[in-house]
Amino acid sequence: MDLKEKLVSSFLAFENKGGLDLDSNVHSIRSKAILNFEKEGFPTKKDEEWKYTSLNSLLKNDYSLFPKTKKAVEFKNVKEYSINEIESYTLVFIDGVFSSFLSDTTHDDCDVCVLSSALTRPKYKMVVDNYFNTIAKNNNSLTELNTAFSVEGAFINIPKNTIVPKPIQILNFSTGSEKEVMLQPRNLVVVGENSHVQIIERHQNLSKNAVLTNAVTEIFVHKRAIVDYYKIQNDTENSSLIDSTFVSQKQQSVASVHTYSFGGKLTRNNLEFYQEGEHINSHLNGISILNKKQHVDNHTLVNHKYPNCESHELYKGIYADKSTGVFNGKVIVQQAAQKTNAFQQNNNILIDDGASINSKPQLEIFADDVKCSHGCTIGQLDESALFYMQSRGIPKKEAKALLLFAFGNDVVEKIKIPQLKTRITKLIAKNLGVNLGFEF
Amino acid sequence: MNKFTEDDLKKELETKEYEYGFYTEIEADKFPIGLNEEVVIAISKKKKEPEWMTLWRLEAFKVWKEMKEPDWANVKYEKPKFQDISYYSAPVQKPKLDSLDQVDPELLKTFDKLGISIDEQKRLSNVAVDIVIDSVSVATTFKKTLNEKGIIFMPISEAIQEHPELVRKYLGTIVPTSDNFYAALNSAVFSDGSFCYIPKGVTCPMELSTYFRINEGGTGQFERTLVVADEGSFVSYLEGCTAPARDENQLHAAVVELIALDDAEIKYSTVQNWFPGDKEGRGGVYNFVTKRGLCEKNAKISWTQVETGSAVTWKYPSCVLKGDNSVGEFYSIAVTNNFQQADTGTKMIHLGNNTKSTIISKGISAGHSQNSYRGLVQIGARAKNARNFSQCDSLLMGDLCGAHTFPYIEVKNKTAQVEHEATTSKIGEDQLFYCNQRGIDTEKAIALIVNGFSKEVLNKLPMEFAVEAQKLLEISLEGSVG
């Protein structure tokens, strides 16, 4: 039985077994979603959006959809994966199940809790009805699949005029309790007017077993709110991640999503921004440093619908060994979106012969009074700069790493949490196989 | 004098009718509508083609029948009904002439209206013109001069008979019959076109030029051009198009193949001004063209195009840089107005070492038009030190038009250096203000800015052609180009 059949046929069991409310609004959303998924199936290379990324190697595994055996995870096992130098709210999910023991939630000024309780408690009915699956719906079959099985994930609800005092970390661990596991976390983030929040998200496989994560995050940013969202992707070679993040912004809000891809067998990031007001600022930053046979596919979309908005997109990639990278950036400027400033840049360095990059920076512009540009470069390290450093006693390996680090630095510079910046810097150094000898 | 504002310009652009819209009455020898194997064979017979050619066409037809019309391009149009088209139409008179005196005066008048005086061109611009009216060449000039150099420049139908070995060797090598839907259709039914062969080490002493026109209402035109530049040779080839105004949509599906052998250079320039439809978007030509060139060692192919016409354009002149050190270039201006749609760009396929390519694409959209750039830069795994630079700029006039860029960049070699940049903007208020401030009125200022915007590409056109290109740009954007 192939994966699609398995997923479709286990849907009923999933709804019944979970003790889910079958009368609720969410139930009808799920049922519609599974029908859509059944109709469309998994994307293939024939789809323009999946031209450079094939899921075939992932779909032939016989994934366990609802891992039964539980493995205890102790704090010391996962400590290194959280940014523990700072105080933070933490939401930890082990094999898709919330671990209250490892987490630190709150309901004081804002709600940092789990989606399962939000979906069932009457208190949150309004929020769920207004936001859940509103931007993610009818997008693509993988998102539909996630919606169909959406039961658990982070639920973050920030009321008006609230500055969340510490960052929120969302950590998803898989323990490898079964040989092949498929996880489908679903996050919902609602940020009220004038509020500010910083979120760090990470998916981590603690074993050598295969994991396929199909995650969906919906983020709603209200008037004048500020959201910084950081995604750290440094998983094992058997872990694959399909991450879809949808951001809907109201006027004068500022939203930034930073994606750091350092590892994983296959990583696909769908990142979509919808601007629903004037004077909005959207930032998309990303850095990918890959080696071996890793594959990262960054698909971004910025949809400008209203005048006087801006979007800034900067993606950098360093590809070694036989790794492959894909960048597909789409900027749409609708007819009403006059005075839009949209900038997009994608720079790549290929280190080894087996590495390759496919880049497709795309502009679709229907308004005339706009400033839009995109740039894309693919190149290699400057030999003369390398020689200069070597002639001054810096070994080649370090010289190379320094240059690569400098190449990616302007993306790292955009991190607003100092401890996170240090962590990312260390990860980059580790990935490049050197000790940089300095920290931020 | 009233101040000429951008709004005035827009109005003028919208109301501007197709200036070259006229229709020459020449009795045409025309096939009944429809397409089947018999029609393909009949076309082949009509052209007195050898058997291999007939088989080649039938093969292409077989492939075509299996294919589906592509719909991935960013254009919307009513699909042509391929069974409602007559696949062959030729002027009844088929003179083989040495001088213009023997040409049908009706035809000569047509050229006069187009502003192409063959006499003039013969004397002044030193251009040999192989004029194609509705698929059949009726006048070839300068043949003698070319003959002395050993250059073959003739309609492809004659070339198939006179130089079958050359045509057979190269035809369909770079655009195979199965390449795409329209290339297959063209291979099956092409009626005529040009063939050009430059022998080893010869520099063609003049610009070779062909004027294509669609004349008979309701006939599709399927041109086939094959240019072969043998080792160390050079040729500059010009192609220009104008078509009379017709109400129904006309299909134009040409194939152009360029082959540059070692150290050869081909410069291929196009000015395209097919009927774009009226200001409501009625009528107009569908222009679905496959153009591709192959570069062997140290060879160079340069495409320059000025696109002002056609209701729908779907065209990607490409270079396959097979040989080491080969160079591919693409310079394009695409102007769309009213309801025109253009999806054009280029493909640069780098296979050899040290290959270089440059892409400069300028899009100007006005009215309700949609203008897309779609390009591919592909660096193969074995292509060391490949270099590409791409730049596509779009200028928008009015808020109802659209400009789109779809660049595909695929790199499989670490020594490659690829740069792509694109910008979209309108004519800046501050730029206009600056000009006004210095006593340049708005009309002239717009002209200045548009001219400057397209200069990089216009400069690449051969002298003789640049004048005509300017003229055609004027028709599309009159009031803005000085």
Image (cartoon, rainbow, N blue to C red):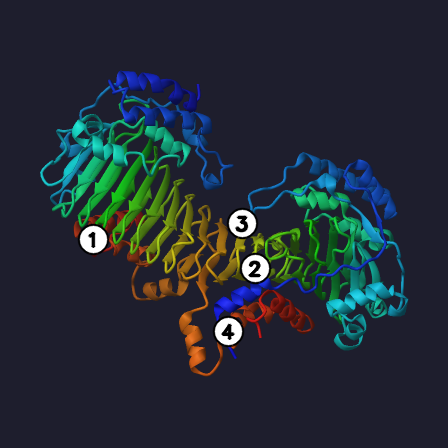
The answer to whether marks 4 and 1 sit on the same chain is: no
Q: Chain of mark 2?
A: B
> Mark 3 highlights which residue?
B380
Q: Quadrant of the C terminus of chain A?
A: bottom left
Residue B337 disc label: 2
**Amino acid residing under circle 2:** Asn
**SS assignment at label 1:** loop
Which residue is depicted at the point 26% across and 47% down? A427
Q: Position of residue A321 (x, y in %)?
A: 41, 45
The answer to whether marks 3 and 2 sit on the same chain is: yes
Whole-number angstrom distance, CA of label 4 to CA of label 3: 51 Å
Residue B4 disc label: 4
Closer to the camera, A129 or B267?
Answer: A129
**SS assignment at label 2:** loop
Q: Quadrant of the N terminus of chain A?
A: top left
Position of A374 with respect to B81 (left or right) is left
The answer to whether marks 3 and 1 sit on the same chain is: no
Residue A52 seen in this snapshot: no
Residue A392 disc label: none
**Amino acid residing under circle 1:** Lys
Position of A246 with respect to B335 (left or right) is left
Of circles 3 and 2, the one toward us is 2
Closer to the camera, A256 or B167?
Answer: A256
**SS assignment at label 4:** loop
Q: Chain of mark 1?
A: A
